[in-house]
Image (cartoon, rainbow, N blue to C red):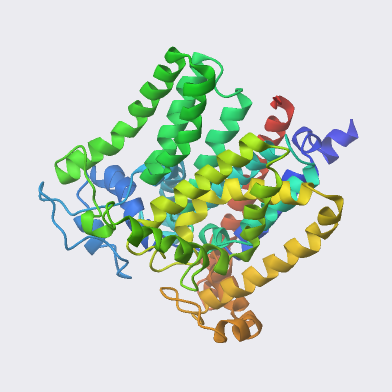
């Protein structure tokens, strides 16, 4: 009986893979998670803040009164309805809503003690929204682990995920710029495909209905995620051929995505609208123009996917390596990869503007991670190289990320050779900047510089992080006990 207290039930059913992932994310939350709602995330969050506090979708006060750091917004554009424009989707706001509610309750309870204003932008909101993104990012990694271990050894699965997360651009959007859509993309895509496999490709009408809702949520995060519905549609049309299941899926999908159209109607006056404008894209008829951008999207020093995150090339090789063993999955991954490249290259600014690496390609990480796992699994000699190679690429990526944090490289431009290579050595000094910008680090700093109340806020922060990741371990234990393999 004593062992029950030493090792609780939920820990006894968690294998070492998910435990390692939770531990790494937990350390990241303590020392790297930045309490920030900025950049594009400022406008994503405006949907939620305006609805909760102002009970409308008029973003004028968000853009003017609370935009002290002058984050990029569409504040100067007035729509046909007379409202301030917001070209960003509502999906992130929906996923952040539970974390917003927790922040609201915490601010009500402790705001008077620490002189915090309950306006949607005070301490607990700046903590809980980034923590929510990190939570979803980790949950996406745990779901991806559940997928991978169906096909490869558990050790290969966890090391592939660790490499994909910490050896790619995703690391920045988990810890440095968490209030963005990118961790939510990683989560919703992983969630949809995990459920698709768990239910044997939506074998019943109820599974098809719920799958349609998950697909709808995925597209609410970013509309271009519609391409990830294509493989599921292909199965419905070629293998299942059950029109009722397809109707259940489509109805549920429409039932969720219609809320984006309602939001566009309120703000722009139209149910179907392209907020970025036609000028944002290369004309579809100019095929050669946007096809020429695909190599740049992948290999350009200006935020090219493989130039900034070379570890992911292993995933592309893995698609080829697994053709003989997992032919159908390999072809699906290659199809999705090609489709994503085409969609992202049709945007004039293929590089995505300000950001770390090919941020818009984070949507491909669950598929590339499968390729990585297949590559290591393909031969025992490759598997022996897995850990040192993965760790080497992670170190390389973290050093580049530190240069980005310290603005030693241009966040909106290309990596300039050979300066960025030599910067991989000198950039290590920015680790202290990364630590100081974290929620815990900044709380301790303000505590030591005279405002002792921040010591208590820092303690509360560490407690919140700890409880969050213990909860995630419990979810992992549940998944372990209830996982059915196809």
- The answer to whether residue 165 is seen in the rendering is yes
| Image x and y of residue 157, in percent | 73, 46
Q: Nearest the camera: 3 or 21?
A: 21
Asked if 304 appears above or below 193 in the picture, the reply is: below
Residue at image coords 66%, 54%? 317
Residue at image coords 41%, 73%? 412
- Image quarter (top left, top right, bottom left or bottom right) of the C terminus: top right
Residue 350: image quadrant is bottom left
| Image x and y of residue 268, in percent | 16, 45
Residue 291: image quadrant is bottom left
Asked if 473 appears above or below 41 in the picture, the reply is: above
Residue 1: image quadrant is top right
Question: From this viewpoint, which residue is outermost toward the right?
Answer: 2
- The answer to whether residue 35 is seen in the rendering is no
Question: From this viewpoint, which residue is outermost toward the front?
Answer: 288
Left or right: 8 with respect to 201?
right
Left or right: 118 with respect to 135?
left
| Image x and y of residue 150, in percent | 72, 34
Residue at image coords 34%, 28%? 254
Q: Nearest the camera: 258 or 285?
A: 285
Q: How many marks?
A: 0
| Image x and y of residue 6, in percent | 85, 40
Q: Nearest the camera: 328 or 226?
A: 328
Residue at image coords 57%, 71%? 401
Left or right: 125 with respect to 310?
left
Asked if 411 appears above or below 207 in the picture, the reply is: below
């Amino acid at each position: 009986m004593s062992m029950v207290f030493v090792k609780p039930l939920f820990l006894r059913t968690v294998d070492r893979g998910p435990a390692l992932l939770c531990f790494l994310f937990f350390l990241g939350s303590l020392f790297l998670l930045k309490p920030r709602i900025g950049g594009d995330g400022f406008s994503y969050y405006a949907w939620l803040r305006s609805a909760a506090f102002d009970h409308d979708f008029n973003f004028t006060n968000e853009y003017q009164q609370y935009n002290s750091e002058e984050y990029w917004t569409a504040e100067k554009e007035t729509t046909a309805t007379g409202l301030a424009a917001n070209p960003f989707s509502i999906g992130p706001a929906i996923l952040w809503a539970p974390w917003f509610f927790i922040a609201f309750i915490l601010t009500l309870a402790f705001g008077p003690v620490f002189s915090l204003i309950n306006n949607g932008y005070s301490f607990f909101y700046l903590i809980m929204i980034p923590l929510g993104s990190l939570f979803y990012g980790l949950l996406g990694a745990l779901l991806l682990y559940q997928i991978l271990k169906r096909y490869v050894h558990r050790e290969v699965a966890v090391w592939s995920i660790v490499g994909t997360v910490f050896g790619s651009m995703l690391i920045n959007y988990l810890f440095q710029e968490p209030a963005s859509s990118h961790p939510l993309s990683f989560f919703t895509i992983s969630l949809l495909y995990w459920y698709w496999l768990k239910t044997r490709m939506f074998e019943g009408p109820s599974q098809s209905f719920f799958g349609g809702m998950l697909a709808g949520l995925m597209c609410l995060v970013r509309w271009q995620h519609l391409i990830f519905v294509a493989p599921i549609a292909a199965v419905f049309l070629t293998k299942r051929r059950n029109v009722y299941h397809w109707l259940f899926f489509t109805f549920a999908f429409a039932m969720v995505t219609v809320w984006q159209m309602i939001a566009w109607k309120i703000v722009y006056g139209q149910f179907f609208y392209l907020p970025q404008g036609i000028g944002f894209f290369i004309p579809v008829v100019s095929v050669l123009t946007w096809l020429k951008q695909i190599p740049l999207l992948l290999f350009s020093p200006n935020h090219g996917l493989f130039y900034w995150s070379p570890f992911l090339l292993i995933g592309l090789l893995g698609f080829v390596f697994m053709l003989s063993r997992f032919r159908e999955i390999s072809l699906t991954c290659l199809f999705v990869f090609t489709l994503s490249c085409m969609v992202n290259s049709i945007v004039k600014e293929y590089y995505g503007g300000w950001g770390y690496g090919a941020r818009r390609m984070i949507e491909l990480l669950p598929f590339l991670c499968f390729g990585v796992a297949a590559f290591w699994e393909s031969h025992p000699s490759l598997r022996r190289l897995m850990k040192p190679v993965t760790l080497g690429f992670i170190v390389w990526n973290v050093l580049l990320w530190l240069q980005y944090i310290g603005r030693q490289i241009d966040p909106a431009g290309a990596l300039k050779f050979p300066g960025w290579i030599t910067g991989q050595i000198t950039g290590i000094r920015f680790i202290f900047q990364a630590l100081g910008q974290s929620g815990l680090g900044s709380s301790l700093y303000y505590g030591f510089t005279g405002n002792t109340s921040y010591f208590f806020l820092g303690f509360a922060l560490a407690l919140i992080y700890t409880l969050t990741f213990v909860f995630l371990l419990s979810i992992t234990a549940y998944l372990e006990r209830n996982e059915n393999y196809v």
